[in-house]
Amino acid sequence: MNKVLRVYKLDVGYRKNVVSGITMEVMPGEIVALIGPNGAGKSTILNTITRQLEKLSGNIYIKEKEDKLVNGEELSTVMSMVTTKRITPQLMSAREVVATGRYPYTGRLGILSPKDWEKVDQSIALVDAKEFAENDFGKLSDGQRQRIMLARAICQEPEIMILDEPTSFLDIQFKVDILSIIKRMAKRENIAVVLSMHDLEFVEALADKVVAINDGRVVAVGAPEEIVTGETIEEIYHMEKGCGKTLIDGLRGYSDALFQLINR
């Protein structure tokens, strides 16, 4: 199976390095979680992959094609992104917001065909948002908005989805719901997912691979059970020896329950 995203010795930052030497590969249907403390550079990495920031050095390959050879139009049909930024479209229904995900396919006039609207409604159904699809987007709850933004990203029919803290501002039930949708979407639609996460208790339940970041470098890359350990957590978050194991032991039972919920 071909890699859909490959990053090799990538340096990212705002004029100066924030994180150096990032190397990772993502396969279709694979979920890769970036973990690390606030300010470690997780969002900077994602913003560089999606071209919101210019890379400092290194290489990014989209479907084995060097990113500089992928034009913006092509990228918009291969990759979509969901961020924590709260957008406030004026006088648009949730369904209309989802429909903007079809713009890469509509040409200059931006007119959606019946097939486009069919894809819009399929995406809304996939995130269980039909109940409020015609509601004013500006009046939705945070959890409902996040579902709609996920639907918008799915509507682009991407092969790669980038998610920056997709469960920020959400309570526990909405977090479980959103992560369950992400897992289902990745596996059913064979979409590669790269996301940043703060909630360690969700990492093992969701991710196939974890990239741990701190102090300007990638500390470790591997399966969740290899990375979410006491020693690694102590290194990433600069905890005293023994504290990481205590934390992970405390989260383990919780993670097992979340695994059942997210993979239901």
Image (spheres, grey):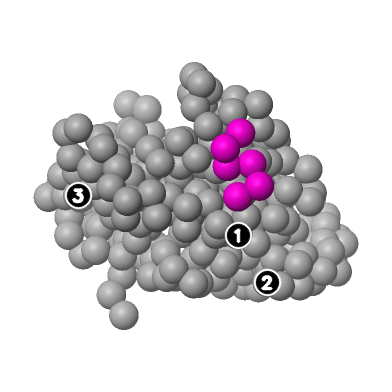
Residue denoted by label 2: 263
From the viewer's perspective, is residue 74 above or below residue 3? above
- Direction top: furthest residue: 90
Alpha carbon separation for disc pair 3 and 1: 26 Å
In the image, taking residue 145 as reference, residue 255 lies left or right, namely right
Quarter location, residue 229: bottom right
Q: Magenta stretch: residue 134 in it?
A: yes
Residue denoted by label 1: 181
Q: Amino acid at mark 1?
A: Ile
Q: Which residues are magenta?
A: 130-135
| Quadrant of the drawing holding the C terminus | bottom right
Quarter location, residue 11: top left
Q: Earlier in the sequence, mark 1 or mark 2?
A: 1
- Residue 253 in the image: state x and y as whole percent: 86, 69
Residue for point 49% across, 72% down: 188
Q: Is residue 98 visible?
A: yes
- Residue 19 in the image: state x and y as whole percent: 43, 42
| Label ID, residue 74 | 3
- All told, the count of numbered labels is 3
Q: State yes or no: discs 3 and 1 in contact (Cβ < 8 Å).
A: no
- Direction left: furthest residue: 69
Residue for point 33% across, 33% down: 53
Q: Element at badge 2?
A: loop
In the image, taking residue 32 as reference, residue 100 lies left or right, namely left
Q: Amino acid at mark 2?
A: Asn
From the viewer's perspective, is residue 22 above or below residue 180? above
Q: Earlier in the sequence, mark 3 or mark 2?
A: 3
Q: Magenta stretch: residue 167 in it?
A: no
Alpha carbon separation for disc pair 3 and 2: 32 Å
